[in-house]
Image (cartoon, grey):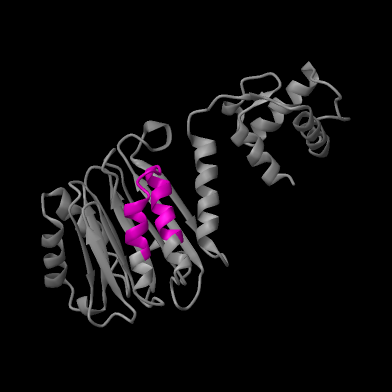
Amino acid sequence: MRIATFSLVARDPETGALGVAVASKFLAVGAVVPYAKAGVGAIATQSYANTRFGPQGLALLEAGASPEAVVEAFHRTDEKIALRQFGLVAASGESASFTGEDCHPWAGGLAGENFAAQGNLLTGPEVVEALAETWKERSDLPFPERLLAALYAADRAGGDRRGRQSAALLVVAEGKGYGGQSDRWIDLRVDDHPDPVPELERLLRAHHLFFQPAGEPEPLSPEALRWLAELLVRTGDLEAPEAEWSPRFEKALRDFLGRENLEMRYRGGPALEPAVLAYLRGRYR
């Protein structure tokens, strides 16, 4: 099955983090295309994807092979290489992008220091150009947001000419996984959605909210207190709206935030991080 896809594989020159951002008119593209290993490299395999390229390519990079040597190895071991497309970036920042001659047009890629951008069955070269140019221009953003900014620009430049369906973001960095126990920092997927890239951006904001260290809380305004009291009545945590802050109000809010997996972001009292309040307003409109 062909996977008409556009992807960006990149390395953060400041931290060494590695990642893949990908979108496609294909169900659950994140289950097929992206591979990455901290301190080693990242790979996107697409267009009649050979999923062996992921683990094989990472093993070769870990053994000291250059991206060009990996491309040569894939040529030697895959008789259908003309149908394949892939991009890879090593932990050194070296990169390569390959598009087989039998990939469905428009198909092509661009590669430079710390990035490889590629796509097939696209509306035109402007999609890959948007990936590459936005990656270069948005160095002001944190690495995960920079990857998604490039993906969004490519999507809005035309993207997959068949339409939209799924998107994914995979980012690895040493010790950045859950509880510091792994290197898998961010692994988010939108498997089936009419506009998956903005939805992926929403999931990234939620990921930061749930897993990043808590920020500074701000005092709740009277309007925010009223809204929270009404919400806690709706959820059954309060019997009636509280006109003022009270120990009962605080216990109800703490219980509610615990069910929302946000207990680590509440320090007590009539104060919340703005990001937490914004999340709750969006979730409970």
| Of residues 19 and 35, the one drawn nearer to the viewer in this rendering | 19
* Quarter of image, res 233: top right
**First to last magenta residue range:** 130-152
Q: Position of residue 184 (x, y in %)?
A: 37, 43
- Say whether residue 36 is magenta: no
| Of residues 208 and 84, the one drawn nearer to the viewer in this rendering | 208
At horizontal 43% and vertical 70% (from top left) the residue drawn is 159
Q: Quadrant of the N terminus?
A: bottom left
* Quarter of image, res 280: top right
- Say whether residue 143 is magenta: yes
At horizontal 68% and vertical 45% (from top left) the residue drawn is 283
Q: Position of residue 176 (x, y in %)?
A: 36, 36
Horizontal side, residue 135 vs residue 60: left or right: right
Q: In the rendered image of this protein, does residue 253 appear above or below residue 25?
A: above
At horizontal 38% and vertical 43% (from top left) the residue drawn is 140
Q: Position of residue 100 (x, y in %)?
A: 23, 77
At horizontal 11% and vertical 54% (from top left) the residue drawn is 65
Going by the picture, which residue comes out furthest to the right?
240
The total number of labels drawn is 0
Horizontal side, residue 2 vs residue 197: left or right: left
Q: Position of residue 227 (x, y in %)?
A: 79, 35
Going by the picture, which residue comes out furthest to the top?
247
| Of residues 131 and 260, the one drawn nearer to the viewer in this rendering | 131
Q: In the rendered image of this protein, does residue 12 appear above or below residue 273?
A: below
Horizontal side, residue 194 vs residue 95: left or right: right
